[in-house]
């Protein structure tokens, strides 16, 4: 496999246009002076939603955020590997996903970033390595721009959908809005069938049928409200300004056969916008590289968490 390393790159000129914001973006509320302890396996979000979390091992903390429609279980293999290396691993299910509550609201990035803040505060995690896949790269970027890096030591973007997916005047290479509407219509009509139809490019040819079913099972645990709203948020958000404001060392891992988040549109531009970043390209890797290249992902995470 081939690595392409980009250290402290300059942002592309065309990405410099316009401030980044979600519609209705609001300032963050002040953090609690004394974090409340998380009750059992759940963390309570600021609006009362309950977020299911897994918390394994001891040592320096690594906090995992799941991709669109996936749960914290997606990180099981990486968490086992990192726990074996003496790290503490925490993962939680996004609201409306897996075992977390489904409030039917809060699927825009400001609230999702506040959910991440609640997990960090209630578990009192510090010197954290944040790891996010796909749409959760936006949660990391929005958390850091909204809440600051006081608890965060470093960040990893795995196959991110940042900085901006949708086509616009200042993002001419983005996705066609009409195509996105067609995709959402297909999901609303028959989501299980949509998953089956779109599974092949997420994996590689030798990914076992059982592993594919395991991933599909997780994605079927996402509520339709969360599914559609999170898709809309991840496609329509603009994180260019958020990414420029990240101050912690950042690693971007991305496959050059990613059909869901093409490298040139997402991972390469994400690394170019973050001041202290490094891009590592996995040759032949698809969007599901946490499965298809799981041993290499684990090695890179361990090395970076200890850097």
Image (spheres, rainbow, N blue to C red):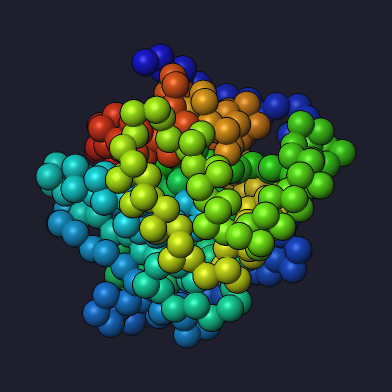
Front residue (pair 251, 92): 92
Q: Is residue 302 visible?
A: yes
Q: Quadrant of residue 304?
A: top left
Q: Quadrant of residue 210?
A: top left
The residue depicted at 34 percent of the width and 41 percent of the height is 209
Q: Residue furthest top?
A: 2
Please state if 170 lies on the left or on the right of 64 as rendered: right
Q: Is residue 148 visible?
A: no
Where residue 160 appears, as percent x and y from the top left, is: 53, 41
The residue depicted at 60 percent of the width and 76 percent of the height is 105
Where residue 127 appears, as percent x and y from the top left, is: 31, 53
Front residue (pair 9, 68): 68
Please state if 222 lies on the left or on the right of 268 as rendered: left
Where residue 147 appears, as percent x and y from the top left, is: 52, 62
Q: Residue furthest right?
A: 169
Q: Quadrant of the C terminus?
A: top left
Where residue 243 appears, as percent x and y from the top left, is: 60, 43
Please state if 108 lies on the left or on the right of 19 as rendered: left
């Amino acid at each position: 496999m081939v690595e392409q390393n980009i250290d402290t790159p300059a942002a592309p000129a065309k990405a410099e246009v316009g401030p980044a914001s979600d519609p209705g973006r609001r300032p963050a509320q002040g953090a609690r002076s004394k974090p409340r302890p998380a009750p059992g396996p759940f963390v309570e979000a600021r609006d009362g939603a309950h977020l299911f979390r897994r918390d394994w091992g001891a040592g320096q903390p690594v906090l995992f955020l799941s991709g669109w429609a996936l749960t914290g279980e997606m990180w099981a293999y990486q968490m086992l590997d990192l726990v074996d290396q003496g790290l503490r691993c925490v993962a939680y299910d996004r609201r409306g996903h897996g075992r977390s509550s489904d409030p039917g609201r809060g699927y825009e990035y400001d609230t999702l970033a506040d959910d991440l803040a609640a997990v960090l505060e209630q578990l009192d995690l510090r010197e954290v390595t944040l790891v996010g896949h796909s749409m959760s790269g936006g949660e990391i970027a929005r958390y850091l721009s909204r809440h600051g890096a006081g608890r965060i030591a470093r960040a990893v973007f795995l196959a991110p959908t940042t900085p901006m997916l949708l086509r616009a005047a200042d993002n001419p290479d983005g996705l066609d809005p009409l195509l996105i509407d067609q995709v959402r219509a297909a999901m609303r009509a028959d989501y299980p069938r949509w998953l089956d139809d779109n599974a092949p490019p997420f994996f590689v040819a030798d990914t076992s049928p059982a592993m594919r079913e395991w991933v599909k099972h997780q994605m079927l645990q996402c509520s339709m409200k969360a599914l559609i709203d999170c898709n809309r948020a991840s496609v329509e958000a603009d994180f260019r300004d958020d990414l420029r404001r990240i101050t912690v060392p950042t690693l971007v891992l991305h496959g050059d056969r990613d059909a869901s988040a093409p490298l040139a549109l997402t991972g390469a531009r994400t690394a170019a916008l973050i001041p202290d970043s490094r891009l590592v390209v996995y040759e032949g890797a698809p969007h599901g590289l946490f499965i298809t290249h799981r041993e290499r992902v684990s090695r890179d995470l361990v090395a970076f968490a200890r850097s």
